[in-house]
Image (tube, grey):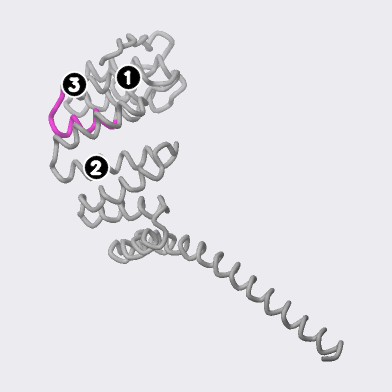
């Protein structure tokens, strides 16, 4: 074989090799994009109210990549829209296993899991869920979630305890526990206790326009003497 022939064949071999590598790289990139694209298509379908089509997209994404927590999350949300809370719970709990401490995603997962259990009407399971999760995360949001659902199921003693724990674990400047208590009292037309909770909230966050507006709706003019220091609740076991 001539030198020219060997050179040509070597060049062809290198070109083929490079082509194969490029194709493999492209396939891997396309695969990743396809899973992302499936979720995007599912979100578009959900946005127009076509939840069955959205479910198909999210389910395919979750099957293609079982470690895709967002796919399981979106699938769980869609199952709730389709009034299938047991299936929603399974998908959402799978996402929670994958993302147990994501500061953005995990609280949303816990919100939706609580809703899926509540819709199944299994209140014992709901109590057990809160025993596991609220005690594991210890944030105001976790205890406010618990309080909200305890009110829904009529367990006001458990709700009151959860409100107190929310106040105990709230960060400085976080008035959300007192606003939630005010919401509760307003829902049962108990104005004096609603105003008392708003005074606590105003003391914690005197710059909040929302709190000021809510006080005004109750006939209270915000000012330096309106806020009242809330009693720091003792830790409840």
Identify which residue, 181 or 35, lies in the foreground: 35
Q: CA distance from mark 2 to mark 1?
A: 27 Å
Instruction: Quadrant for the C terminus, please.
Output: top left
* For marks 2 and 3 on the same chain, the one whose residue lies earlier in the sequence: 2
Query: How many residues crowd around disc 2 within 10 Å: few (fewer than 14), some, or many (20 or more)?
Result: some
Please give the residue where the numbered disc 2 appears in the rendered image: 115
Q: Does label 2 or label 1 sit earlier along the sequence?
A: 2
Residue at 30% of width from left, 32% of height from top? 133
Q: Residue at x 51, y 62 (%)?
A: 32
Cβ–Cβ under 8 Å for marks 2 and 1: no
Residue under numbered circle 1: 198
Q: Tell me: residue 84, above or below residue 117.
A: below
* Location of the N terminus (image quadrant): bottom right
In which image quadrant can residue 118 be found?
top left
Q: Is residue 151 magenta?
A: yes
Lower sequence index among marks 3 and 1: 3
Does the magenta portion include 224? no
Between the residue at mark 3 and the residue at mark 1, the CA separation in whole angstroms equals 12 Å
Counting from the top left corner in percent of width and height, residue 2 is at 85, 91
Distance of mark 2 from mark 3, alpha carbons? 27 Å
The reply to whether discs 2 and 3 touch (Cβ–Cβ < 8 Å) is no
Overall secondary structure of the magenta stretch?
A: helix
Depth check, front residue: 44 or 123: 123
Front: mark 2 or 3? 2
The residue pinned by badge 3 equals: 190
Q: How many marks?
A: 3
The residue depicted at 34 percent of the width and 15 percent of the height is 200
Q: Tell me residue 53's x, y (percent).
A: 32, 66
């Amino acid at each position: 074989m001539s030198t020219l022939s060997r050179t040509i064949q070597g060049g062809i071999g290198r070109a083929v090799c490079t082509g194969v590598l490029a194709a493999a790289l492209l396939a891997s990139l396309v695969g990743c994009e396809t899973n992302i694209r499936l979720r995007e298509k599912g979100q578009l379908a959900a946005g127009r109210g076509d939840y069955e089509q959205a479910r198909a997209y999210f389910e395919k994404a979750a099957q293609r990549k079982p470690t895709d927590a967002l796919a399981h999350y979106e699938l769980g949300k869609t199952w709730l829209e389709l009034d299938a809370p047991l299936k929603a719970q399974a998908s959402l709990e799978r996402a929670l296993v994958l993302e147990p401490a994501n500061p953005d995603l995990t609280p949303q997962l816990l919100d939706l899991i609580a809703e899926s259990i509540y819709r199944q009407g299994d209140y014992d399971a709901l109590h057990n869920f809160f025993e596991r999760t609220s005690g594991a995360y210890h944030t105001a949001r976790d205890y406010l979630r618990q309080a909200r659902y305890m009110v829904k199921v009529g367990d006001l003693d458990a709700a009151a305890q959860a409100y107190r724990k929310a106040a105990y674990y709230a960060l400085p400047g976080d008035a959300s526990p007192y606003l939630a208590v005010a919401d509760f009292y307003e829902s049962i037309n108990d104005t004096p206790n609603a105003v008392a909770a708003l005074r606590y909230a105003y003391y914690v966050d005197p710059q909040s326009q929302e709190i000021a507006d809510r006080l005004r709706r109750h006939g209270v003019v915000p000012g330096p003497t309106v806020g009242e220091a809330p009693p720091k609740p003792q830790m409840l076991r």
